Amino acid sequence: MAFEGLSEKLQGAFKKLTGKGKISEQNIKDAMRDVRMALLEADVNYTVVKDFIKQVTERSIGEKVISTLNPGQQFIKIVNEELTKLMGGSVAKLTWSPSVPTIYMLCGLQGAGKTTMAGKLALNLLKQNKKPLLAACDIYRPAAISQLQIVGRQVGVPVFEKGTQDPVKTAKEAVEYARYYGQDVLIIDTAGRLHVDEELMEELRRMKEAVHPQEILLVVDAMTGQDAVNVAKSFNDLLNIDGVIVTKLDGDARGGAALSVRAVTGKPIKFAGVG
């Protein structure tokens, strides 16, 4: 699972300080060197790591950790607090629109797991006594609509699709359909796209303007690594995303993508899943 590798390496760094009656500023700097390497090896973005190390070091020395009764434990506490802050501090929940339907628009790179996650999100909402509707707005990937229909049947949620017509038009019609038939949540599954593809990115901007989603959620593959930062920044700059969904957390023991995206965008992790 994600963060297993990072946790093991951090524990190794902490062992050098745990149990010591006295430590020096040099001890702290040596430990921070190990923490830095652990974060970099976990694929956390270099700039994020640099800022994190600076913050922890300043706090550790500023709070006079070296003069406390248990300096090693105090240092670990600071690292844990700063890691928690990096991840957002608390679990972020989806927000709701005052009018029906509440619209969630999923976006991200191809292969990030948007379609599967759309189904999981719909099932989660179904269990909360909501009436979700899935909208098939990926007209580019072969069999994308069929895949969403299969996912919809598996979780017991209807799918709105209009074939290969303009996805923005399909999204608008899906909103009207949801409103007419009393579906209180609409989840829009958009096509995966590279953040450097100006035409497809513009399509997302048009869709946002057309349907005014309550939340735009960026779906990020946990194994994306360093490039997750560039992806997240590009999508956020264009769409001002509201949150991040991290997928395939069982496929990577590093977890750097999640830490990096949260730190760079400042947007909360809203949902996470495996597979």
Image: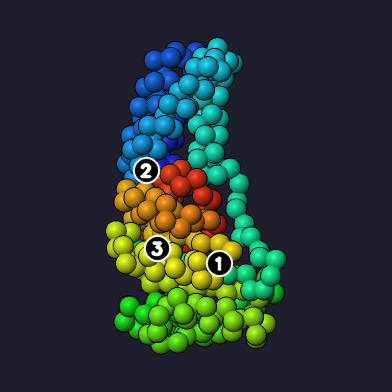
Task: Name the residue: 52% across, 78% down.
Answer: 172
Above or below: residue 129 compared with residue 69: below
Mark 3 or mark 2, which has the lower sequence index? 2
Mark 3 or mark 1, which has the lower sequence index? 3
Element class at badge 3: strand
Element class at badge 1: loop
Query: x and y percent of residue 153 in the render?
Result: 52, 85
Q: Residues within 10 Å of mark 3 (few under 14, many from 20)?
A: many
Task: Name the residue: 69% across, 74% down.
Answer: 129
Q: Amino acid at mark 1?
A: His
Q: In front: 133, or 80?
A: 133
Element class at badge 2: loop
In the rendering, which numbered label is found on residue 108? 3
Question: Where is the N terminus found, in terms of image quarters?
Answer: bottom left
Task: Name the residue: 36% across, 64% down.
Answer: 201
Circles 3 and 1, Cβ within 8 Å, touching? The answer is no
Q: Is residue 113 visible?
A: no
Query: x and y percent of residue 149 in the render?
Result: 46, 85
Label 1 belongs to which residue?
Answer: 212
Label 2 belongs to which residue?
Answer: 44
